[in-house]
Image (cartoon, rainbow, N blue to C red):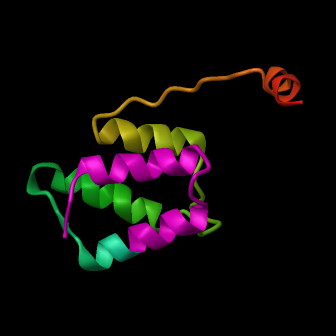
Amino acid sequence: MKITRKDVAPKIADYLHHQITLDELVDWAEEMMMEADFESHDLEALRDVVSRLGLADVKAFGMAWEDCEYFLSRLGYKARVVVTDGSAMAIAES
């Protein structure tokens, strides 16, 4: 399986959007490190980011928002935060 930046960035986004857990992201990254071929064009960045994602569940390494922002920038993406008023959604749902 060939892995590209277009495979890695959505995984980070899924984690940031709480669509996957940290454990799921780490498991995916560990599997990619063992089984995937990295696209040669972005080899260094891909290998560095995926290997770091694979260590995110280790307390000494962890993973902060700034780490995700940095990983995405290494892959040619920009992270953006959108803040919405959750109380307005709760009123609309009731």
Residue 93 pos. (x, y %)? 83, 30
Q: Residue at x 70, y 22 (%)?
A: 84
The residue at the far left in this view is 40
Provide residue 68's location: percent of width, then percent of height.
Answer: 49, 44
Q: Is residue 7 magenta?
A: yes
Give the quadrant of the C terminus.
Answer: top right
Residue plotted at (48% across, 73% down): 27
Question: Residue 70 appears in which quarter of the rendering?
Answer: top left
Tell me what residue is drawn at x 30 percent, y 79 percent. 34
90 versus 22 height, above or below: above
Q: Main SS of the magenta segment?
A: helix
Measured as percent of width and height from the top left, residue 76 is found at: 28, 35
In this rendered view, identify the residue nearer to me: 85 or 59: 85
Q: Residue at x 32, y 57 (%)?
A: 48
- Bounds of the magenta span? 1-30
39 relative to 17 in the view: left or right: left
Image x and y of residue 91, in percent: 88, 23
> In the visual, does 73 lie left or right of 21?
left
| Residue toward you, 41 or 16 | 16
Q: Is residue 3 magenta?
A: yes
- Residue 55 in view: no
Left or right: 17 as drawn, with respect to 89:
left
